[in-house]
Amino acid sequence: MLWRQDQGGHKRTIRSVAWSPDGRQLATGSFDATTGIWERDEDESGDYECVATLEGHENETKSIAWSKSGALLATCSRDKSVWIWEVEEDNDFECLSVLQEHTQDVKMVAWHPNEELLASASYDDTIKIWRDDDDDWYCSDTLVGHESTVWAIDFSPSGDELVSASADETLKIWKRFVPGNALGIVTQRRGEPIWKCVATVVGKHERCIYSVSWSKVNGLIASSGADNTIRLFEVKDATAPVGTEGRLTAEQQKALNEPGVLFEADKVADVRKAHGTSDINSVAWYPNADHGDWLASGGDDGSVRIWRLEDDRGKLSKSQSQIEDCDDTTDDGMLLSRLKEL
C-alpha cells in the first residue's frame, strides 16, 4: 500500500475517486457532501495532502469526473444537481454552473473523451447531455428510454456513442447524429446534434446493472451488477436485413425520426461469481495502451480485483490478488483462462 487516507479529509463514506488527467491530483467525493482535492507531497513520505475542499452540494456527493484537459471538474449529488468547477491556479476551484434539471438523485457524471461535453445519469431514469456556451452550461439533450434508474454511463473511444447501464437490467447504446447526417435524422434547433438509442442489450444480466466501462483501447464494453457477474461485449454494426429486427427503412426513419437498431453488442466473455456472492458495484478499464487489457472490479466483499483480457478476446483471466476463489465457468459453456499473475 502506497498511501491510506484515514485521518482528516472527509467525515463520512467516500463514494467516488478520480485522478486528474496528469495524475498530479486525486479528487474524492463523499457522503459528507464535499469533494476533496489531494496532492502528493514531494518529500520522502509521499503522503497526500488535502489542498482544497469543494463545498456546495446539499447532500451526498455521488460521482466526480475530470475533463480530458484537466481544466474542469464535474460533481453530482443526491441533491439532484450537477456542479461544474473550473480549475484555477494555486489549487483554487471556481464553480461555473449549478445544473438542476434532473428531478431525482444524480448517480454519475462522465466527460466526453475529446470534447468539453458532459453526460449525467439519474434516478429519474434519464441521461442528460450538457454543453457550454461561453461558460453558460445548459442541457442540450435528454435521453429517455430506460424504465428505471440509470446507474452508469460511459462514452465510446470516439465519443460519438454512449453506453448506459440501468436497474431495468439493460444496457443501451446511444449515438450522436449531427445536422445533415446520412440517415436524415432531424436534429435540434440551433444546429445542435441529437442523441438516439441505436441498440438495447436485454437478458444478459439477471439483476440491476450498476457499472459500465467502454474501453478506449480495445473498444470492448464491460458491465457488472447485482447478479455477481462481469460481462464483456463487442459492439459492431447490426447485421439484420433492413426492415427486420428493429432495422428501419429509409421511409420509416424519416417518418419516425428514429434510426432503429444500428448496432449489436455480442457477448465475448463473462465471469460469474466474480466477487463470490457479492454485488459488483464498479468496473473500469485501464485508461491507456500501457495496460489496455486490464479491467478492475470492486464489490461488496470489500475487494478490488484486476482481470486481464487475452488476445483472442474470448477469455478473461484474473490476477492472484484476490480475497477468495471464484467459479470460472460461464453460462454459455466458455471456460475462462487459468489464473495469471499481473
Image (cartoon, rainbow, N blue to C red):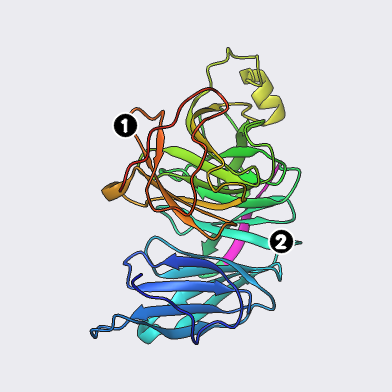
Whether residue 186 is visible? no
Identify the mark nearer the N-term, 1 or 2. 2
- Judged left or right of residue 267, residue 199 is right
Main secondary structure type of the part rendered in magenta: strand
Residue at point 52%, 63% (across, down): 132
Q: Which residue is mark 2?
A: 102
Tell me, yes or no, if residue 51 can be seen here. Answer: yes
**Residue identifier under label 1:** 311
| Amino acid on which disc 2 is placed | His
Range of magenta residues: 137-145
- The local secondary structure at tag 2 comes to loop
> In the image, 342: left or right of 228?
left
Which percent across, then down, holds residue 29?
55, 72
| Amino acid of disc 1 | Asp
Q: Nearer the viewer, residue 285 or 321?
A: 321
Q: CA distance from mark 1 to mark 2?
A: 42 Å
Asked whether the residues under the numbered discs 1 and 2 touch, taking CB atoms below 8 Å apart as contact, a structural biologist would say no
